[in-house]
Structure formats: structure tokens, C-alpha cells
Image (cartoon, rainbow, N blue to C red):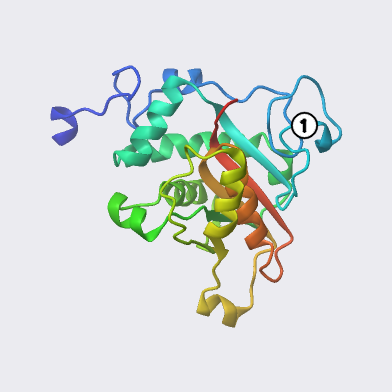
Amino acid sequence: MLSWLFPATCELCGEAAEQGICDSCLSKLPRIPAPVCLHCGAPTAGQQTDPDRCEECAGHTRPFVLARQALRQTEAVMQLIYRFKYHRSLYLTRALAGLLNELWEQTPRLCEHADWVLVPVPVTHGKLYTRGYNQAGELARCLGKMRRLRVMELLERRETGIISQTRLSARARRLNAMRAYAARRPVWWQRARRYPARIVLVDDVFTTGSTARACAAQLRKLPGVQEVVSLSLVRIGA
């Protein structure tokens, strides 16, 4: 009865849509075009054999094996992310996680193994209290159900005095991210001593890669972790 009185509509075009985005609009969202950097996923002018050729990666450490992003930054894409992240539009979760699942299927490295563990990028306790949820956590749990993978909260976000990295310079982002994230070892997990060898770090946006690098570096400190892959919805600036 409620569905009949208040039918679900597409966030972008207003047509009927069960998942918040209709199939037509979902197919029109701009994917990251190939070819991309073998390491960070940035669009490149031609096929690449050495990650050092990518300007985005030059001079950076590589705590993650590779990073991939599903969508380019456009007004429509950012509208979806804004509503999902700040306006409790959790009905978009399945459609957005589906984009990550699509990206997964297009990434040979991820398809080679079935023992990946999903780890969402955490938010501060203040943001979690105010917002009521962690958007990366929602994406990770939905993607985990799609691919039948475990989700583990293995990171924590420390308070650094900086509310958001959005307006920080690239250098300031790196410094803040290094202070902000730390590996978290649950008591039950320490007892089991079953650390995952392969981890997929899940987030909503990828800007300079500072957050992904900081989180991956912390995860690599956990015993047994062999490789970390970063998977994000949107690449800012692409």
C-alpha cells in the first residue's frame, strides 16, 4: 500500500525506480575510461607498463597494490554521492554497490582470488553520531552480500581537529591522513590469529589517494596481510 501511495522514483530523472536510480540513468553514469594507470586507476593517454609513468603516482609510496574507481566526477554523480552521504539516502546503497560490483568484474586481479575481505574506510565518532551511519560501511556490507565476502572493521578514524579534507591541499591531505587512521585489532580476532591475506579497502570517493594510502599502510602492519586493493565509487578530478 505504501509503495502504491509513495512509489520509489529515480533520484536523477524522476521515473519509477526500485533502487533509487533507474536502469537508464545508471547506464548513463560516466565510467572511468580505459586505459588507466596500472596502480592508481587514473585515466592515461595510452597503454601503460610502468606505474612511475603516471604523474599521480610519481614519488608516492605504494602500500596498496592497485586502486580502481567506478565513475568520473560529474554534476549528476556528485548529486548522488551528496544525497547518499549527507541526506541519509540509504535507498541508493544497492545501486551504488552494484557499480562497485561491476568494477570488480572488470578488474582481473580481484577476480583471481575468492578470499578477499572488505574493509570500509572509517569516519570519526562525531560524524558517525551526527550522520548515523558510515557510507563506506554501507557500501562494503552491500557489496559483501553481492559477492559473499566478509566485511571487517579493521580501521579506526582518529580526531585530528580537521573536520573534512575537502578543502585541503594535496600535501595537507597526506599529512592529515597519516595522523587520522590506525589499524584496529579486535580482541576476538587477535585470539583467532586469522588475519586476512587480501583486503579490499572500500570508500565512496578517491581524490588524491592520501586516505587510501594511509589506510592501506596501516592495514599492511597487521600480521598476515599480503596485499591491499582500493575500490572507490568516484574519482574526483577525473
In-image side of 208 versus 39 (left or right): left
Q: Identify the residue under disc 1.
A: 54
- The residue located at (58%, 82%) in the rendering is 191
- At which x and y percent is residue 37? 74, 32
Image coords of residue 187 (percent x, y)? 51, 79
Taking depth in this image into account, of 12 and 215 the one nearest to the observer is: 215
Question: Which quadrant holds residue 57?
Answer: top right
Q: Is residue 166 above or below residue 27?
A: below
**Please, what is the three-letter code of the amino acid marked with disc 1?**
Cys
- Which residue appears at 85% of the width and 35% of the height? 50
Secondary structure of the residue carrying tag 1 is loop
The answer to whether residue 23 shows anywhere in this view is no
The image quadrant that residue 178 belongs to is: bottom right
Can residue 235 be seen here? yes
* Quarter of the figure that contains the N terminus: top left
Q: Position of residue 194 (x, y in %)?
A: 64, 73
Above or below residue 72? Residue 106 is: below
At a point 57% along the width and 34% down the height, the residue shown is 102
Mark 1 crowdedness (10 Å alpha carbons): few <14, some 14-19, many ≥20 = some
Residue at x-position 60% and y-position 35%: 69
